[in-house]
Amino acid sequence: MASVMGLLEARETAAQVRVEELREEAERVLAELAKAEAVLERRAIARLELAEALSGPEPEADHPPESVPAVAEAPVARSVVPHGRVGLTMEVLAPDYQRLVGVQEAEAGGSGLRARELAGRLGLETVPAKVEGVRSKVKRLVERGWLAEERPGVFTPRRAAG
């Protein structure tokens, strides 16, 4: 019969071997993870570059496109706001801009909203820094044709051409 001390040493050795096997496997998995993350980063950069290139200069006003399909890629925070065109849906906008357009569309029957009111409806504090951030984004949406500013400082949904 084996001694108790010998049994414990054998178990400890087996556990040590198992730990080493798992360490080697973890290192292999981490190396694969690093490679996969590098591929993901390259592809994300490529998608951002493409989105930026596609949102470049607007086509000539003489020949407006009949229909422009929405970009299938998910929008990225801090992305460029594309010019609103026929067939382009608000899903191409970054989430913050989507929320602003959505609040305006919910108020379609109203007389428009000021930046302070928009900030409040978005759940933001109505402190100057937040209100000016909202005003800047809304002005960009107006410049790009997503919203309208029929009176100074009062923003409304864009009117359908008709």
Image (tube, rainbow, N blue to C red):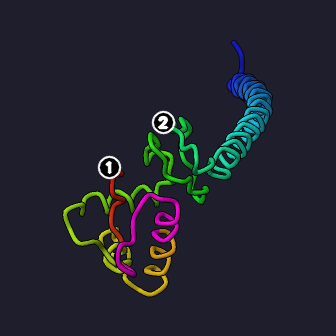
Q: Is residue 127 above or below residue 8?
A: below
Considering depth in this image, is 76 or 161 the residue closer to the camera? 161
Instruction: Confirm or deny contact between disc 1 and disc 2 (CB under 8 A).
Output: no
Q: Amino acid at mark 2?
A: Ser
Amino acid carrying label 1: it is Gly
User: Residue 96, relative to residue 29: is it above or below?
Assistant: below
- Residue at x 33% of width, y 57% of height: 159
Q: Secondary structure at mark 2?
A: loop
**Which numbered disc flags the more N-terminal residue, 1 or 2?**
2
Residue at image position (62%, 47%) is 59
Q: Which residue is mark 1?
A: 162
Residue 126 lies, in percent from the top left, at 37, 83
Front position in the image: 105 or 25: 105
The quarter in which the N terminus is drawn is top right
Residue displayed at 50% across by 69% down: 137
Q: Give the CA separation, mark 1 to mark 2.
A: 16 Å
Residues drawn in magenta: 138-153
Tag count: 2
Of the pair 140 and 48, the residue shown nearer to us? 140
Label 1: few (<14), some (14–19) or many (≥20) C-alpha neighbours in 10 Å: few
- Residue that badge 2 annotates: 67
- Looking at the image, which residue sits at the far front? 62
